[in-house]
Image: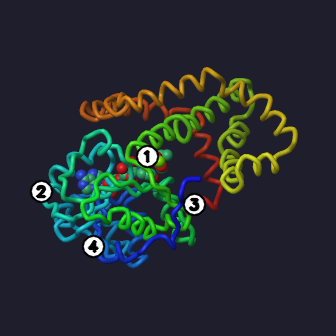
Amino acid sequence: MTKMFYEKDANFNFIQERKVAVIGYGSQGHAHALNLKESGVDVVVGLYEGSKSWEKAVADGLEVMAVDEAVKCSNAFMILVPDEKQSKLYQESVKPYLKAGDALIFAHGFNIHFNQIVPPADVDVFMVAPKGPGHLVRRLYVEGTGVPALIAVHQDYTGKAKDIALAYAKGIGAAKAGVIETTFKEETETDLFGEQSVLCGGVTELIKAGFDTLVEAGYQKEVAYFECLHEMKLIVDLLYEGGMERMRYSVSDTAEYGDYMVGKRIINEETRKEMKKVLKEIQEGKFAQAWILENMTGRPVFNARRNEEVQHPIVQVGKELRQMMTWLKK
Ligand SMILES: NC(=O)C1=CN([C@@H]2O[C@H](COP(=O)(O)OP(=O)(O)OC[C@H]3O[C@@H](n4cnc5c(N)ncnc54)[C@H](OP(=O)(O)O)[C@@H]3O)[C@@H](O)[C@H]2O)C=CC1
Ligand SMILES: CC[C@](O)(C(C)=O)C(=O)O
Ligand SMILES: [Mg+2]
Ligand SMILES: [Mg+2]
């Protein structure tokens, strides 16, 4: 089995002896900054003047500065602005102020793996990539658990990059859940594949296809919403807690029989062939190239698809039903 690292394997001194600039205060940024601070790490948040996040970070009790100022006064920088903005930010506000022995940290390998950022040889470059959304990285830390993470070392100038990565992972709560060592290549390719084919693209298309099939057949859209979207969370909770065997133990034998008979008709050989094609496009850099070009040209496809998606009937019915779910309001 792959070696897993837990809290006992991390020496927290490696991160406590540094000042950490968390650049960006979005989904991952707010979680890393707050978790590290509450774990006892000296943290500053780096943002641009006029950023919407600035006041929020201040209200959360954090020290906030312009990115270049944060880089100047720190010796470890976690880059948590969107992937497509990292290269420009690095060139303008990070690279000019790097000092030998600094640590340049990423939560996803896109920019290093696809050569959008090429750091100098005299800094450590590594990754601490939580395997979960930033808001859960924060929520589970507060609840006393954590989201697992991958670590990877791209450059080890100080000879301590892996130790610092493990200590950082401990600081954000990830070492409670488990940390696996990987490479930038493996993290980047598996993360892109997972979000496209399974976690985001796969799941949303599966939900919409099920919802549309029921609604087009004349069933109430509220019933279709509960069946195909709301209950997905409850089923996934069981998968998360105890794997497929726990989910199949909890559902009825009727559901389990239906699962065995129908699952492979929905996710069939054609789907698996397409997944292989998607993975190849990621490995060959075709997806990265398309995403970089999309951003250079003002995101025409991204914006059109985003607008199209919010027109889907599942969006409206979901809004109405969730209004009644008082526990979601906070
Ligand atoms: N989202 C997730 O859960 C996960 C993300 N990752 C990785 O983490 C990294 C960050 O992603 P994510 O958290 O989704 O990003 P977000 O889109 O949530 O980050 C936005 C933050 O970056 C700030 N920002 C944008 N541009 C700049 C800039 N030029 N200078 C300074 N700050 C800027 C925004 O400020 P403003 O408020 O003003 O817009 C905001 O605070 C990526 O590498 C991503 O792949 C990895 C695992 C999961
Ligand atoms: C699944 C999407 C993700 O990779 C994540 C939350 O882990 C991301 O890029 O946001
Ligand atoms: Mg991911
Ligand atoms: Mg991702």
Q: Would you say 139 lies left or right of 98 here?
A: right
Residue count near mark 4 (Cα–Cα under 10 Å), binned few <14, some 14–19, many ≥20: some
Residue count near mark 1 (Cα–Cα under 10 Å), binned few <14, some 14–19, many ≥20: many
Q: CA distance from mark 3 to mark 1?
A: 34 Å
Residue labelled with disc 2: 96
Instruction: Give the farthest residue toward the top.
Output: 270
Q: Would you say 261 lies left or right of 80 here?
A: right
- Tag 2 secondary structure: helix
- Among the two numbered marks 3 and 1 on one chain, the one whose residue lies closer to the N terminus: 1
Which disc number belongs to residue 187? 1
Quick check: marks 1 and 4 in contact, CB under 8 Å?
A: no
The residue mark sitting in front, 2 or 1, is: 1
The residue mark sitting in front, 1 or 4, is: 1
- Among the two numbered marks 1 and 4 on one chain, the one whose residue lies closer to the N terminus: 4
Residue 179 x %, y %: 50, 60
Which disc number belongs to residue 19? 4
Residue labelled with disc 3: 329
Quarter of the image with the C terminus in it: bottom right
Residue 42 x %, y %: 31, 76
Above or below, 107 relative to 295: below
Seen at 80% across and 29% down, the residue is 261
Which disc number belongs to residue 1? none
Residue situated in front as seen by the camera: 188 or 318: 188
- Tag 1 secondary structure: helix
Instruction: Give the farthest residue toward the right.
Output: 253
Amino acid bearing label 2: Pro
Q: CA distance from mark 2 to mark 1?
A: 28 Å
